[in-house]
Structure formats: structure tokens, C-alpha cells
Image (cartoon, helix red, strand yellow):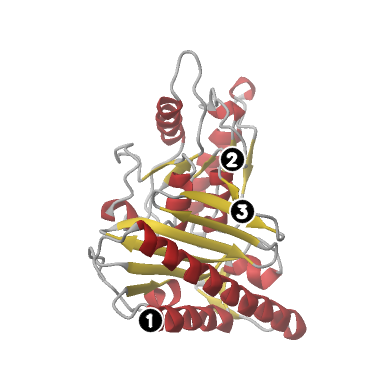
Amino acid sequence: MASTLSQAELNSILDFTVALARKAGALILEGSEAIRASGAMDEKKNSVDLVTEYDVRVEELVKRELSAKYPSFKFIGEESYAAGARTSLTDEPTFCVDPIDGTTNFVHGFPAVCVSIGLIANKRPVLGVLYNPFLDQLYTGVKGGGSYLAQGGRPPARLPLARPRPLPSLSQALLGIEWGSDRSADMVRHKGESFKRLAGNPAEGVEGGRMAHSLRSLGSAALNFGMVAQGGLDLYWPWDVCAGAIIAQEAGCLVAGSHNSPLDNDVNQEVLEGRKYIVIRAIGDTETEKGVDAQKRLIKDFYATVDDFEPK
């Protein structure tokens, strides 16, 4: 199959990956029940970043079925990648899978957990499926075909769920952030200072404070992307991107890389492999500012507020 996929091919792949995501979701629920019954868990890196046998089992299920259906496509899995397997990103179609995004939530029984299946072609995301089996939330997005949320047996609703609202400043924003698994003194200091400025009141002694409405940590990068796409979060500062990126872009969001990346909404190889990302929801036009200009202005303001540091 050519690296440039037609709309019909993408729609066919979407149907298959949605069914596969639901199958993976059933295995995730099975694992959650097993963990509750036994109390057993293994550790990965530290007590904050936990992995279980179901992480591996879900990835093996997804990889096996994708490989059987699309044998010419490449595969990048979060668990196999962490174990040392490496697949170079080329123009060829490549599935990018996180079998259980929100592993710590999964182990603790916190229901912000999903399987994430993305498809990259010509080094850019073109399809994304996120499925949270605990809440029966299914986010989907296809390049040029829009993005949708289906939940609880209701028909899919196009994203964003409401007409995009203006966003004058970060002080009116609900921001998504995460602590991550690196809890070294240096990393905690950088993030702590950044979060303090985002939330703090400059009138009460927080220098550079933006006094955002609040900060939220769902514990799942992919579901945070989905929440920005639907309009529930205004902006998210993540560390993982693929399936969520195309879902967000198709909902009118702007996705960018690190502090110095161009704000052109091009999630290219440099962005995909850069490990620094930001996504902001669709913003409505006002009489004085286009929504896309507001998106760029607020990303610049956000990056001016937080520390720039290298994730491990």
C-alpha cells in the first residue's frame, strides 16, 4: 500500500482500529479486575510509573492483529520501545501504540485510562483512536475527516462539542499539566516553579503569575488531548503525542513542539520525536483577533511563563 493513504483507506483502517481498541479495552478491564482481586503489581522506573503484565498483553494483542491485517505497515509500541525495540520513522505507514496510557491510574483504579492507536504516514499523524473502557469514551480522528467523541452508546458527536469560545488570556484558562515519572530534585523544581507561576496570583506575591482558573492532571496524556479537542481543557502541556495530535488538529486545535518550534500546526518528524509538545483548543474569533492568532499568542505566553527543561 502506498505511503499516501486515500480517504477511503483511512476510513477502512479507522473501522478496524476502533473494533481493535474496544477489544483491547476489554482486556484492560480484565486486568483491572485482576489487580483489584490480587493486589499484585510490578514496578517500572519508580513507584509513580507502574507497569503490569497487562501493558505487555494489550500491546501484544494490538500488534498481532494490526500485523495480520496490515503486514506492510510498521509498528511502534510504547512497551516494546521502552524495552529497547526501535523502529525508524519513515514515510511508510506506521502504527504508534500506547497499550495502556495512564498506567498509574490503571493500577490505582482511577478511571482515566485508555488504549491509544495512532497511524503515521509521510511522518505525520493521519489517524487516531483513543478508547477509555472504564467510561466507554471513544475519541477518533482522521486527517481531513474531522474528529468525534462517542460515549455511552450515543451517536458520535463532532469535536469540539460546543462552538469555540474566545480565550482572552491564560487567566481565563483551565490548563492540563502532568508531573510525569521523573521526580528528581531538578525536575520537580522546574515543574513546581512553572505550575506556581501558571496558578499564582501576581497581586499576592507570585512573580510572573498568570492566575489561571485552575490546573488539572488527568494522568493520561492521550485523554488530555481528547479533553482539549472536545473543549473541556483549554490547553495541555504534554510529553506524548500521536493519536491525540490528529484528533486535536481535526477539532481545530493547534499542536506545536517545544518553546522554539514554529506555530504552524505541522506535527512533523521533529515534533513527533522531540518529546516536547503543547496543544490548545479551538478558539473563536473576536472583533479584534482571529482565533488562530489567539492560539499562537497564548502558546507564546504559556511558554514565557514556564521553565524550559529536558525530559528524561
Residue placed under numbered mark 3 in the picture: 156
Q: Which mark's residue is nearer the viewer, 3 or 1?
A: 3
In the figure, is residue 96 to the left or right of 86? right
Element marked by disc 2: loop
Q: Is residue 209 visible?
A: no
Q: Quadrant of residue 3?
A: bottom left
Is 87 drawn above or below residue 285 in the view shown?
below
Residue type at mark 3?
Pro
Residue 14, horizontal then vertical, whole percent: 46, 64
Q: Compare marks 3 and 1 and give the one earlier in the sequence.
A: 1
Please give the label number shown on residue 67: 1
Q: Alpha carbon of mark 3 to alpha carbon of mark 1: how far? A: 28 Å
Residue placed under numbered mark 2 in the picture: 231
Residue type at mark 2?
Gly
Quarter placement of the N terminus = bottom left
Element marked by disc 3: loop
